[in-house]
Image (spheres, helix red, strand yellow):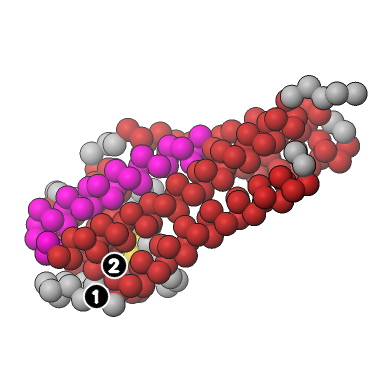
Amino acid sequence: MSLGGYIFYLALIMLIPLWAQMRVKSTYKQFLQKPLQSGVTGAQVADFIMKQNGVHNVRIEMVDGLMSDHYDPVNKVVRLSREVYQGSTISSAAIAAHEIGHVIQDATDYKMMRVRHSLVPVVNITSNLSFPLLIGGFLFGALGLAQLGVIMMLGAVVFQLITLPVEFDASKRAMAQLTSHGIVTATEETGARKVLNAAAWTYVAATLVAVAELIRLALIVFMPRDE
């Protein structure tokens, strides 16, 4: 790869996730200013949807941090950021419903979520080892070491690929719950969908970058070189 091509590639893998983050934050903030007609908070949305789906063993907690919302399937806890937990806005309802989408996946034994969860311990190990192996292989001219590093990177890429259907499915479940239970009106539905779609793009961007970097490094360490 030429110097110009390499610079373009680096700019691309930095700009794609930056664009995705800027999009989700701007969309999130836009609809954080749009109050729900129903007046319910994100915490109430989460609690209501869980009860409607027969889930009674998951706690809801408030945590600090912007967009720090997530579901912890090990400890059975939905953690919602302060703005989502206390807020009565389109963004707070959409994000809360998305996290409960993961709860419903867990409760219904959604296969892709199970696969992703089972990969976490393996990916944690391979991700921590891949770059030291790559750097060591390049520094000491140990091609086999660098190749092992790329192989270990494959685990993280597979994890990213599996994450995509899990996140999209959670958003699909979220929209179904928000609309079927009348939590959002027809007008508010459009905004909620925009929030969820913008959030999904952060996962798409991360996956694209991970795949591109894996391919680039694989070409370097596995393709035969001219002497």
Q: Earlier in the sequence, mark 2 or mark 1?
A: 1
What's the residue type where badge 1 is placed?
Lys
Q: Which residues are magenta?
A: 158-186
Name the image quarter holding residue 130: top right
Q: Nearer the viewer, residue 44 or 33?
A: 33
Q: How far apart in space, not on screen, are marks 2 and 1 (Cα)?
A: 8 Å
Which secondary structure type mostly characterizes the magenta part of the structure? helix
Q: Quadrant of the N terminus?
A: top right
Answer left or right for 151 relative to 137: left
* Residue located at (16% from left, 53% from top): 177
* Residue located at (68% from left, 31% from top): 218
Disc 1 marks which residue?
A: 34
* Residue located at (38% from left, 51% from top): 200
Q: Is residue 44 magenta?
A: no
Helix, strand or loop for disc 1: loop
Image coords of residue 45 (percent x, y): 19, 64
Position above or below: 148 against 40: above
Q: Is residue 177 magenta?
A: yes
Image coords of residue 174 (percent x, y): 23, 52
Answer left or right for 224 relative to 167: right
Disc 2 marks which residue?
A: 91
What's the residue type where badge 2 is placed?
Ser
Q: Nearer the viewer, residue 105 or 143?
A: 143
Indicate which label's residue lies in the foreground, 2 or 1.
Answer: 1
Answer left or right for 137 relative to 187: right
In the picture, the disc for residue 43 is none
Q: Quadrant of the C terminus?
A: top right
Q: Nearer the viewer, residue 166 or 29?
A: 29
Q: Tags 2 and 1 in contact by the CB under 8 Å rule?
A: yes
